[in-house]
Amino acid sequence: MKQTSFGRMRQRIAQFLKEVWAEVNPKDGKVIWPTQEQIINSTLVVLGLLAILTLFVAGIDVVAKFLFHDLLGLYPQTPTGGF
């Protein structure tokens, strides 16, 4: 009996998933998973850089506010409670 295109597609997807599992399988796969210590260190690096960039953007915001509002008198400040 001739296979439909849906049947061939299903077989190809199943074969692909089997090959993916063979590569990421923790026991005998090709992927080398990071250790818990590596994950923690990477997370701390990301959080540290996030904090530094947050402070940098906040600093730019303060400088821009000073330049446009206080020094040049442009864009008057919004009333309390406004956006």
Image (spheres, rainbow, N blue to C red):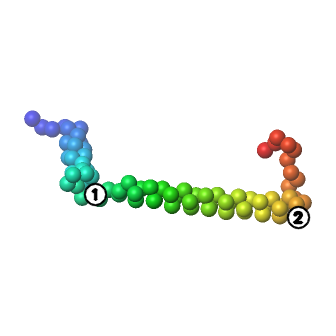
Residue 16 can be seen in this image: no
Q: Quadrant of residue 28?
A: bottom left
Image quarter where the C terminus lies is top right
- Mark 2 and mark 1 in contact? Answer it, CB < 8 Å: no
Which residue is depicted at the point 28% across and 57% down?
31
Q: Residue furthest front?
A: 37
Compared with residue 52, is residue 10 higher up or lower down, i.e. above or below?
above
Q: Residue furthest left?
A: 1
Horizontal placement of 32 versus 72: left or right?
Answer: left
Q: Nearer the viewer, residue 3 or 31?
A: 31
Instruction: Tell me the CA gap for discs 2 and 1.
Output: 57 Å
How crowded pointer 1 is (Cα within 10 Å; few <14, some 14-19, many 20+) is rated as few
Q: Nearer the viewer, residue 18 or 4?
A: 18
How crowded pointer 2 is (Cα within 10 Å; few <14, some 14-19, many 20+) is rated as few
Task: Measuring from the top left, give residue 30's x and y in whole percent.
Answer: 24, 58
Q: Quadrant of residue 51?
A: bottom right
Task: Measuring from the top left, give residue 58's x and y in whole percent.
Answer: 71, 58
Secondary element type, mark 1: loop
Which residue is depicted at the point 82% across and 41% down?
81
| Residue of label 2 | 71
Residue 69 can be seen in this image: yes
Horizontal placement of 27 versus 63: left or right?
Answer: left
User: Which amino acid does the dot numbered 1 rest on?
Assistant: Val
Task: Measuring from the top left, give residue 62's x and y in whole percent.
Answer: 77, 60
User: Which amino acid does the dot numbered 2 rest on?
Assistant: Leu
Residue 31: mark in rendering = 1
Q: Quadrant of residue 52?
A: bottom right
